[in-house]
Image: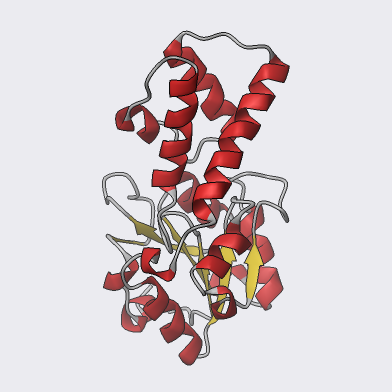
């Protein structure tokens, strides 16, 4: 059995759920272009880049835009999104997330954040969790998207722990695949039907314990 020495957490869907804000921002954009955007369609954008998301939404709305117009629309969406997350509070931390991260730290396990979001630091500041992570590797520090393991490998390197002694917590298939590609254990947060490749699947960090961690 490997001794786990570091836990690397994705942000969205693991520590907080900003999906609602992405949805509201995309919906506002679609409405401004004269059509609607549903929650079912939003599900199809999980883990998809902003540029690709916009292409899909314009396609659903039957709207054609030049590359320059698309860039402006993507920027507008992001402005609305950032404005919404700038009002987040600690009340939006997902159940059990803060407690489990604190338990890891008390047990001497290194904690890292590994997220594609470029707004990670702002969100962590708003929910008062910056001090709970030894390192934050986000979209400003990586060039390759998951399932490439870059974000998690940089996290492991930053805390000085070999990949084999790291566990990644993720809610997306691409994130679990990135953990596997990086030679790390993984815990999926969500549905076992979707995240079956993970070593363990739970519905939220409120179900996670140090005992379960050591059984990986």
Q: Residue at x 54, y 79 (%)?
A: 132
In percent of width and height, residue 177 lies at: 49, 49
- The image quadrant of residue 211 is bottom left
Q: On the rendered structure, is 206 left or right of 69? A: left
**131 is higher (above) or lower (below) than 39:** below
In percent of width and height, residue 59 lies at: 48, 13
In percent of width and height, residue 62 lies at: 46, 8
Q: Residue at x 52, y 84 (%)?
A: 109
Q: On the rendered structure, is 162 left or right of 4? A: right
Seen from the viewer's position, the closer of residues 15 and 144 is: 15
Seen from the viewer's position, the closer of residues 29 and 202 is: 29
**101 is higher (above) or lower (below) than 61:** below
Seen from the viewer's position, the closer of residues 181 and 152 is: 152
Q: On the rendered structure, is 11 left or right of 209? A: right
In percent of width and height, residue 142 lies at: 71, 52
On-image quarter of the N terminus: bottom left
Q: Residue at x 40, y 16 (%)?
A: 35
Examine the rendering and report whether any part of residue 107 can be seen: no
On-image quarter of the C terminus: bottom left
Q: How is the image coloured?
A: secondary structure
């Amino acid at each position: 059995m490997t001794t786990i020495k570091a836990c690397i957490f994705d942000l969205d869907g693991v520590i907080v759920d900003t999906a609602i804000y992405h949805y509201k921002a995309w919906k506002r954009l679609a409405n401004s272009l004269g059509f609607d955007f549903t929650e079912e369609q939003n599900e199809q954008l999980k883990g998809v880049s902003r540029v690709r998301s916009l292409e899909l939404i314009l396609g659903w709305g039957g709207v054609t835009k030049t590359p320059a117009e698309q860039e402006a629309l993507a920027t507008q969406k992001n402005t609305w999104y950032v404005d919404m997350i700038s009002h987040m509070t600690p009340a939006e931390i997902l159940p059990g997330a803060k407690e489990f991260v604190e338990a890891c730290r008390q047990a001497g396990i290194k904690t890292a954040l590994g997220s594609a979001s470029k707004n990670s630091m702002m969100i962590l500041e708003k929910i008062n969790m910056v001090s709970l992570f030894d390192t934050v590797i986000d979209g400003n520090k990586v060039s390759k998207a998951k399932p490439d393991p870059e974000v998690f490998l940089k996290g492991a390197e930053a805390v000085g722990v070999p990949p084999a002694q790291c566990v990644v917590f993720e809610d997306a298939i691409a994130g679990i695949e990135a953990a596997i590609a990086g030679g790390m254990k993984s815990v999926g947060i969500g549905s076992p039907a979707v995240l079956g490749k993970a070593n363990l699947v739970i519905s939220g960090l409120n179900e996670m314990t140090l005992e379960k961690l050591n059984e990986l």
